[in-house]
């Protein structure tokens, strides 16, 4: 019963990602999209919180949204996988259900 | 020109996810025609608007980050960036575009538009304004 | 609205500006100018090409005063003034030249 959560808000602006992390079950996945991609960057004030959550949740980030904001893949926190739109679709089919956090 | 007012546009959102960044930029370009004392502040996620090497081909949205380089032509030469916002996001001045303006009174010398300020300096600057427009 | 170049149709908005600026080709400028009885000389083309380069670099159609200053810098003082540009483009260098160049109407232009 693994769930895919998508989060499209920046961790610096809204509490959406923190709420999502606190309610996501172990073994589920979080995909960061749109403005949410800035939460995936290493060396930020939120990076430790996210690294800790990665102990039992898989993290993904949407590459095209990352590049639109001038952030290259090599700036992403170790362990977060960068996916393209095809990878996004694969994730949706690999999980039992999806929750889109808005 | 006694009726020149100090206008500051405060930008606090990342680009592309919402319309705020583009709307602000358009208002700045239109407003530049009115010969006011204009400045731009980039605070919180707004600092992402100025990152260099933005590539929007994958998301199908116009890369309007190129337009910030035209601000100098529009005589918008005061761009303030909040240091704390950069730090919090693991960014440095080096991650931002190099924006310049040409000083007519100094033989068109190219000068840097961006100045990085502490939060306290930014707060002081807000206080000095006649009009603050928040995006 | 639309116009045709060599049998190909190009869509425009209600003011005659091209809807898809990526479709632009030199023939489009000629066709749009013809609709307004505006002959295009080398001097006109100099401004049109300048505008296309400006758009490519900055992603905007410059305001008239910005265009005037930039033209003066690039093509010389005798061309960087409203008189010269309005003689070339009587409907306004911003509006008319941008239209022929396949650009949107300059931001802030009503």
Image: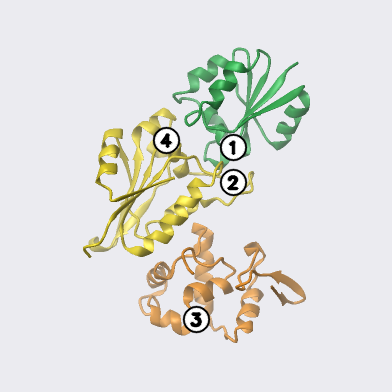
- Horizontally, is A3 left or right of A61 in the view? right
Residue B11 occupies which quadrant of the picture?
top left
Chain identifier of the residue bearing label 4 in the image: B
Q: Chain A colour?
A: green
Residue at mark 3 to residue at mark 4: CA–CA distance: 44 Å
Q: Position of residue B80 (x, y in %)?
A: 33, 44
Q: Quadrant of the N terminus of chain C?
A: bottom right
Viewer-side residue, A53 vs C78: A53
Q: Can residue B114 be spotted in the picture?
A: yes
Chain identifier of the residue bearing label 2 in the image: B
Q: Which residue is mark 4?
A: B44
Q: Which residue is mark 3?
A: C89
Q: Which residue is mark 2?
A: B56
- Horizontally, is B121 left or right of C106 in the view? left
Residue at mark 2 to residue at mark 4: CA–CA distance: 21 Å
- Chain assigned yellow: B
Q: Which mark is residue A34?
A: 1
Q: Are marks 1 and 4 on the same chain?
A: no
Q: How many marks?
A: 4
Residue A78 occupies which quadrant of the picture?
top right
Mark 1 lies on a secondary structure that is helix
Viewer-side residue, C20 vs A8: A8
């Amino acid at each position: 019963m693994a769930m895919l959560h998508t989060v499209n808000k920046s961790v610096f602006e809204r509490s959406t990602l923190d709420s999502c992390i606190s309610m996501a079950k172990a073994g589920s996945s979080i995909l960061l999209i749109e403005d949410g991609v800035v939460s995936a960057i290493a060396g930020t004030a939120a990076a430790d919180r996210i690294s800790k959550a990665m102990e039992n949740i898989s993290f993904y980030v949407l590459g095209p949204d990352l590049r639109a904001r001038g952030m290259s893949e090599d700036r992403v926190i170790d362990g977060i996988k960068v996916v393209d739109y095809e990878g996004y679709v694969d994730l949706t089919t690999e999980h039992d259900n999806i929750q889109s956090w808005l | 020109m006694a009726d020149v007012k100090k206008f500051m546009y405060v930008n606090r959102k990342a680009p592309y996810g919402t319309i705020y960044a583009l709307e602000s930029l358009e208002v700045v370009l239109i407003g530049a025609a009115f010969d006011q004392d204009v400045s731009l502040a980039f605070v919180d996620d707004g600092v992402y608007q100025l990152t260099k090497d933005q590539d929007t081909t994958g998301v199908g949205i116009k890369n309007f980050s190129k337009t910030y380089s035209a601000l100098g032509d529009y005589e918008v030469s005061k761009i303030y960036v909040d240091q704390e916002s950069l730090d919090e996001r693991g960014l440095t001045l080096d991650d931002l575009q190099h924006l310049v303006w040409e000083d007519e009174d100094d033989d068109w010398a190219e000068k840097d538009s961006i100045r990085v300020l502490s939060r306290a300096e930014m707060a002081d600057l807000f206080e000095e304004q006649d009009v603050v427009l928040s995006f | 609205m639309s116009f045709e170049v060599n049998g190909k149709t190009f869509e425009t908005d209600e003011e005659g500006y091209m809807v898809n600026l990526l479709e632009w080709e030199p023939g489009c400028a000629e066709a749009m100018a013809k609709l307004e009885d505006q002959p295009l000389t080398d001097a006109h083309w100099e401004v049109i090409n300048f505008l296309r380069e400006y758009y490519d670099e900055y992603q905007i159609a410059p305001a008239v005063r910005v265009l005037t200053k930039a033209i003066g810098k690039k093509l010389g003082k005798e061309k960087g003034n409203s008189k010269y540009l309005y003689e070339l483009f009587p409907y306004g260098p911003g509006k008319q030249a941008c239209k022929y160049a396949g650009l949107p109407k300059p931001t802030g232009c009503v």
